[in-house]
Amino acid sequence: MPVEVAVCVEAEPWEPGSADTDAVEAVLHALGPAESWPVGTARSILRPDRDPSSYGWERRALLLRDRCREGGPGGAVVGLAGVFALMDERGAGETGAGERTGHLEIVPALRRQGYGTRALAALRELAADFEGSATSGASGASGASGAPGAPGAPMTPGAAGLSGRPPLSVRAANGGDEHRFLLARGFEVVGRTRQFSVPALRPRQSAESVPMRWSGECDGYAVELYGDPRDAPDEVLVAWQDTLLATDSWPTERLPAPELRERWFPVDEWNAYEQPPLVAAYRADGSVAGAVRLDVPLGNDELEFEGGPRTPASPEAPVVTRALLTAARRSFPYCSFYCDLDDGTHGPMPAVMEAHGAGTKWDVVRLRDTVVRFPLSGPVAPPLPAPERGPESRCAHRG
């Protein structure tokens, strides 16, 4: 059973410029090591000693302290809550396509003591304010009380937020404390992503050259390795882009082949010999069935396997995936390969990876809030209780 304690929490803004690197590192030390990929990623975006806007991020964060606990000025750090979004996603959100990602964490030793509930209330308020600031000229909600869209009305699973945007989304380690906590408080799982790692076939030799071209046949498909992407036909680049668009990966816009080359495969004098190879699988009629881009292999023992079958949901997708992976491993037998795959959009690719002996490096679920709507004015949850001051303070820890 949870241990209920009285807590007096203060939520202080953790915004750019509010803390220097030493202060940020002290907070991260108090929070403890990042337990999962979502935690590490969110911390890197939310930390106030960096400017995430230079990388396209908009963010808001609150640092939660309990002044009844000793732990430096303002009390002990007990948790962190924040919301972030890519700026272009946020702009798209005004037409209902964007999504804000929330982050919530509590110091592991202080969980199940009431802090998570207060942190979630802070996160929901922060998300509502974050959404409201993105909408110019909005002044509230419309609709009858209790109807979809009314403040405080229950949200149907998967319904859009009040402004037409999807509700707050949070990523958490599958089966972890945060996952279970959110499921019990009105969130539902809407997606799952795993990072797979396929082992190398053999060790790297001391003087092994990087292959520039390789041709073969795998599972009935002609396969080609283009060690220099400048040698790849336009259709190969377009096929690679088709896979990313079909699986909701980046890029988010369809570009013609010349622009694809310029944006994703730029070649300058300094990097002419450090290009990401492409692997393509061709059907018998010469059309491209799928393509992947690999990391630059110079000095790398683990390469990202990005792409796949051109149509992930097609009947040929498992065979195309197997042909591409087999070709990549034959071309670089001394490298392992990793890829991030979503259960909902990547079709059979996770099963193919597992058949090749892939291990799972991390397993993350995406959850959406199905309870709280975000009005464009006013709070969506009771504010955090104001801490009592002075010797008469009645906040105390029990249990």
Image (tube, rainbow, N blue to C red):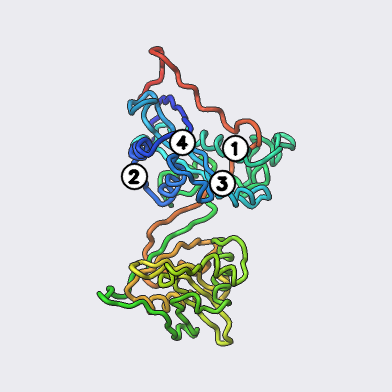
| Residue wearing tag 2 | 33
| Residue wearing tag 1 | 128
Nearest the eye: 297 or 129: 297
Quarter of the view holding residue 213: bottom left
Q: What element carries label 4?
A: loop
In the picture, which quadrant includes the C terminus? top left
| Numbered mark located on residue 100 in the image | 3
Q: What element carries label 1?
A: helix
**Disc 4 from disc 2: Cα separation:** 23 Å
Nearest the eye: 208 or 174: 208
From the viewer's perspective, is 391 left or right of 191?
Answer: left
- Mark 3 in CB contact with mark 2 (< 8 angstroms): no
Q: Is residue 12 above or below residue 101?
A: above
Nearest the eye: 230 or 387: 230
In the picture, which quadrant includes the N terminus? top left
> Farthest front residue?
269
Nearest the eye: 201 or 399: 201
**Disc 1 from disc 3: Cα separation:** 10 Å
| Residue wearing tag 4 | 17
Under mark 1, the amino acid is Ala
> Nearer the viewer's eye, disc 4 or disc 1?
4
Label 3 or label 2, whichever comes before in sequence order: 2
